[in-house]
Amino acid sequence: MSPDESLQFTVQQALRWEPQMQDAQLGVTAHQGIITLMGILPNYFLKVEAERIVKNIDGVRAIIEKIAVVFPKEHCLTDEKLAENILHLYQSSFTIPDERIRFKVENGWVTLEGTLHWNYQKKAAEAALSSIKGIRGISNLLHTQSDRENELLQETIEKALHHSALLSDAVIAVTLDHRKVTLTGSVNNLYEKEEAERLAWNAPGIASVANALEIRPLINVFSDERE
């Protein structure tokens, strides 16, 4: 079995293992660590989940996503109704500063805009939308800007990365310049790369994170037999 065939098989098995993906109509191809996902899913958040699963697989260096979202008839909503549901959701949340968020809905696609203090608020604003049926996609254009003036210490981010069990064998260097963080070094897969970036964003007042981490080539001996 070639490396591409082995990686393709691994991705297919990982997708089938997840209960929510059991009925997914997805095709998978692999070429030099680049995975292409093709097919149809009934909602946007299953598409996000499929991407998350694949990112967590060693040897995956990039993902090309060609998944179409086709709703069951009962989940099709007008843009006006979607906007009403989103507004109600944000106004009823204790963790999302709805007064700082603007959004628009166009053909089922939601675009979020505004400025928040913390990156977790940006993530929460997007994640909360998973409870709303009929969303075809999300563009999260929210920015973070802290009003805190205290100096952010490079050591704080380095300790957070060091204490992460997921990144125990990662080699990551952190540089900080005017609230802009740069991560360099190497990790095993896309999931670890995104986890390192997430931890860096957790520091208050961070304006941007440049994730220059490289993914180590998968070194393995492939067998022609599947156990």
Image: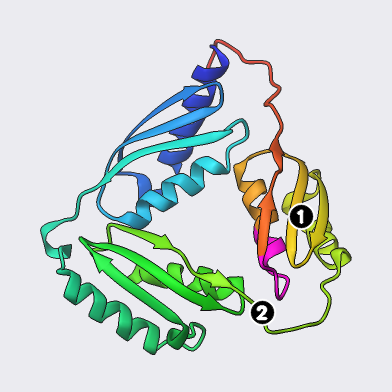
Residue 227 visible in image: no
Please name the amino acid that badge 2 sits on. Answer: Ser
State the count of labels.
2
* Circle 1 SS class: helix
Name the mark on residue 165: 1
Q: Where is residue 127 drawn, in percent x and y?
A: 45, 68
| 97 versus 28 height, above or below | below
* Residue in view at x 20 percent, y 50 percent: 70
Q: Where is residue 103 drawn, in percent x and y?
A: 35, 74
Q: Where is residue 203 drawn, in percent x and y?
A: 73, 71
| Label 2 CA crowd tier, 10 Å (few <14, some 14–19, many 20+) | some
- Which region shows up in magenta? 198-207
Please name the predominant secondary structure of the magenta segment in the image.
loop
Judge whether residue 216 is colored magenta.
Answer: no
Residue 107 visible in image: yes
Name the mark on residue 146: 2
* Left or right: residue 101 compared with residue 41: right
